Image (cartoon, rainbow, N blue to C red):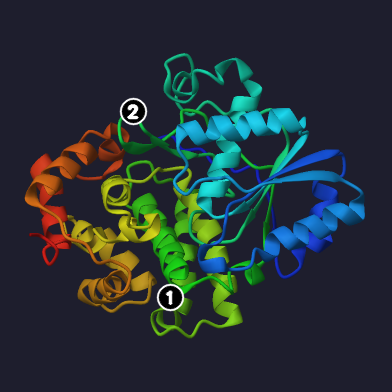
Amino acid sequence: MDHYYYTPTALFYGENCVEKKLKCACANAERVFIITMPFANGAKNQALYDISACLELMGKHYMIYTGAEENPSVESIVSVARAAIAYKADYIIAIGGGSALDTAKAANVMLRHPESLDLPYELFYGGNLDHNTVDSGLLPMCAVPTTAGSGSEVMGFAILTRSDTQTKLRMNQLSYFHFAFLDPNYISGSPQWLLDASAMDSLAHGIEGLLNRNAGPISSIWNRYGFSLFAQFKDNLLNLCLTNQDYNNMQLAGSFQGMGQMHSTTTIPHGLGYSLTHFKGITHGIASIITMPAYLRSFKDKSGVDSIVSQCGFASLDEFEEYINAIVRRNVDITVTENELDYWARECFGLEPRINAHPEPVTLKDIKAILEYSLKDSIV
């Protein structure tokens, strides 16, 4: 099988990297459009403060747009693009989690195609462009992630909520940031549920990216290194005692799993997770990991599964499942019906790219069984 590797984003890691390196990233900018969103539970957006201070020292004009949506809808992207056009922006900085970063990537593509402001679904999901066409948008842009799980800062994907089909789906285009700044201080003040969700999203990216027909030699290296980082902080995450080094490892794991997953796409757990987020309000990272133990148990060939479990620091799949269940229990309290499980299984089975990427034959009945096992204590 042929493989390729392409991640064009320049990464700056470490404390105070914004202060040290932002000037070289946007030296030619004149009117900077900052995309962010309200932070959970009133948490301080330290990244926004640092970015604003640096831009003021550089004498740059900037506008702060705080209307990015969680799980951004296609319609919200139109609003962001119109605001950037009205401001006459010439540079974009995205601050926040995967939703804010995906918003920036999608809006920037729309800026290149302003004729599609009234036809956004045609732009993002129509048949005029080949799937995976690289279109990094009209303006240069950089990312400042404040969560450590999506990997959106190094991935071309932008996942949008489609109101027409009531699901989440990546847009056709691949859109990349030119620069990304990862400062562990930006995640250290996050609420525990967000730290849990970020770590689980990153872990799911790695597992689904490696157990994948599209996995390549370079992307697999990033996945496995991400597992080794997870093994170092997993116990402290569970026991609510993360250290500064843990925050650094979490950020690195999120980016590395993003670089790996970018080249293989996600499979069944993410496909099922989209329904859990859309219909039950479960945050994306947790929704993507709920079905992971059952998913791994469904493999007939356990050699790849056993290798991943070991690299993540677990002695067995049973121990892995016990850990995931502990994280899920403290974040999820829902009830589901058999009819809902049927619908979600069919929705996932209809996501052809994800089903085709799964390395073993799979049926609709198999997917329903994964859901039933994972949510057995929630079925009413």
> Residue 312, how many percent across, how many down?
38, 71
Q: Report which quarter residue 8 is drawn in.
A: top right
Residue 160: in sight, yes or no?
A: yes
Q: Which residue, given by chain and number where applicable, does mark 2 sit on? A: 164
- Label 2: few (<14), some (14–19) or many (≥20) C-alpha neighbours in 10 Å: few
Query: Horizontal placement of 311 versus 186: left or right?
Result: left
> Residue 207, how many percent across, how many down?
35, 57
* Mark number displayed over residue 145: none
Q: Which residue, given by chain and number where applicable, does mark 1 sit on? A: 231
What residue sits 22% from the left and 38% below the top? 347
Q: Earlier in the sequence, mark 1 or mark 2?
A: 2
What residue sits 40% from the left and 82% below the top? 235
Secondary structure under tag 2 reads loop
- Going by the numbered disc 1, the residue's amino acid type is Ala
**Vertical position of residue 232 compared to residue 149: above or below:** below
**Vertical position of residue 176 compared to residue 375: above or below:** above
327 and 130: which one is in front?
A: 327
What residue sits 27% from the left and 53% below the top? 280
- Going by the numbered disc 2, the residue's amino acid type is Asp
26 and 58: which one is in front?
A: 58
Secondary structure under tag 1 reads helix
